[in-house]
Image (tube, grey):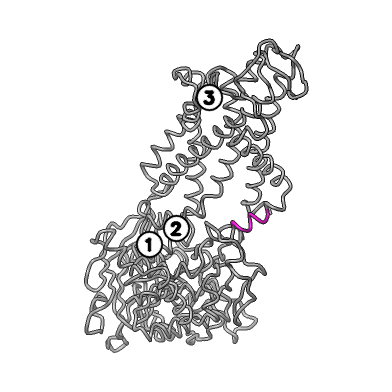
Amino acid sequence: MPEPQCARPRSVAVEAVAVAAAATPDGGAAPGHGAAPEPGAAPQRRSAGSDGGAPTGKPRGLWSDAWHDLLRNPVFVVSALVIVFLVVISVWPSLIASRNPLSCDLALAQEGSRPGHPFGFNGQGCDVYTRTVHGARTSVVVGVLASLGVALTGSVLGALAGFHGGAWDAVLSRITDVFFAIPVVLGGLVLLSLVAGTTVWPVIGFMVLLGWPQISRIARGSVITVKQNDYVQAARALGASPARIMLRHILPNAVAPVIVVATIALGTFIALEATLSYLGVGLRPPAVSWGIDISDASPYIRNSPHMLLWPAGALAVTVLAFIMLGDAVRDALDPKLR
Amino acid sequence: MTIIDNTTADVPSGPLLEVRDLHVEFHTRDGVAKAVNGVNYSVSAGETLAVLGESGSGKSVTAQAVMGILDMPPGRIPRGEIFFRGQDMLKMSNEERRLIRGQKIAMIFQDALSSLNPVLSVGYQLGEMFRVHLGLSKKEAKARSIELMDRVRIPAARERVNDYPHQFSGGMRQRIMIAMALALEPDLIIADEPTTALDVTVQAQVMDLLAELQREYHMGLILITHDLGVVADVADKIAVMYAGRIVETAPVHELYKRPAHPYTRGLLDSIPRLDQKGQELYAIKGLPPNLTRIPAGCAFNPRCPAAQDICRTEIPALLSVTERDGTELPGRGSACHFWKETIHG
């Protein structure tokens, strides 16, 4: 007959399999505030007390940690500078190009570079430099708004599906499948040919319509992963309401993948706008867009390559900058790549 | 011989929590997993009930059902009642139950690191209790959080209130979990393996703190554990679970002295002891049953050294245990056809 066993420090696991101490939920990411106050707000502190203390020297949150990583990443610095420049010239194009992109002189059509007109003239005799600078606005507006729209729509729908599960999730998943089956360019040709107008809104609307399912899937998966964490269970056990659990506990932990994908998608939306404009269903003249200029210039590529190369080059650099930025953000937010 | 009815707890005001014939099942691809199959237990104010069992014995699922944080679906409660202060919580609305959670019944989880949100400071998470349930302002909530952290003896609470969970050691994190559970001075605390993820040296400190605070606030405590060492010092009574049923109940020291169920005896025999040096450690042979295919009769029969034919056909009821001369042993019960042979040798 066994004696009473009271030696407490000798904890005896009855369980066949010892419960593995779960790994850090974020794979060791040093987590932090959503709207992170910069590290100064969380003063550095040496370990206090006998059985505790900060395990890391510099306490930082996930976001401020990611920010520090980004600043040390040359890819981020270069792409961010390019993007800042693009944003500035799309807000104030007259800073570096004071002419009117729509005032053209047919007599100068297809002329090459000359003083005051470094990029030459296009088929209508418009200044290519001015048009290239002014075209940045369209690209940046379309890219940023489409990304925002996609990120908001996709993450709200995806997060609700992941959070509630069940029928809502099943229905949403099938709807995303339907949208995935629509080829983007073909869909654009069909849908955008139905709308008239020269504004960017139909193009943005179309991109949001076809783009949200991708983000919605990612948000759904991310929310499902986070939802299974013990701290969500703990929040429920402490009586937090579903809205509070979603907004305070799940969202800040689930948002990183959405940000990464939306940033990378921004570059592809800019390229898509150019593609659609090239095909004649995106923006239409008199709107100024790199896609339109590339389209107009393509018949003359042998005689006057400058008409095509400048807007195409600007497009390539812009798309590259956004995609590189997205990559850098992903590297910074994904602790496994550290 | 009577069927044990825990409703007749020896506290004048009646038990704080009473679980009656609780059944929980999960619908899985392999069929219906019967995780809890008719559990009865009760806890009174100031009392500690230890629920002991292997992984998959249903101890945590029972607790989740009590807390109302079971994922449904896939979980389902086909039968049973959970009375808290005489009210059946299974009949309450979600909102009524949410207000009980945290305020009247609180839970402490096993792994404090994963139970704390990594992107929120501990002060925020502690303060959340006051803000959700009492509607305090941010500033008031913070002041209360610091008080609480002092209460669970976190050094330099005022400076550390804005730190993040990963900046605390394991023992401190578990104390923060305890602080969160205590925040609103609940009537009942359910601690689900509160020390499993901790170093043995810290385990004792955390258990002592928990026991002390329980005495001070006169709370009921349900301590879910697989660690017989933890139970001995803290608990008043023990319920041993196997395959979703309670197989033995007893006041804590009696269980160690004279187990009345072969499974309990197996557990006690598998504790390593210093005087056994060089001998092989006893292990209960076999594995816990698959909950989608619980063996007929007594669920323990395939692993039981004393199993007879009746064990394979008839489910033993939880019966009260008596001395050889028939005097009843208060609070003791065993769900074994051969409890007499087991306890009296």
Residue named by callout 2: A248
Residue A55 picture quarter: bottom right
Q: Could you tell whether A326 is left or right of B57 in the image?
A: right
Residue named by callout 1: A240
Type of amino acid at the residue the image marks with label 1? Ala
- Foreground: A19 or A59? A59
Spatial CA distance of label 1 from label 3 is 43 Å
Spatial CA distance of label 2 from label 3 is 37 Å
Which stretch appears magenta? A63-69
Type of amino acid at the residue the image marks with label 3? Pro
Residue A237, percent from left and from top? 39, 65
Residue named by callout 3: A183
Q: Main secondary structure of the magenta part?
A: helix
Q: Could you tell whether A29 is left or right of A209 in the image?
A: right
Could you tell me which secondary element the residue under label 1 belongs to?
loop
Q: Tell me if residue A137 comes above or below residue B76 in the rendering.
A: above
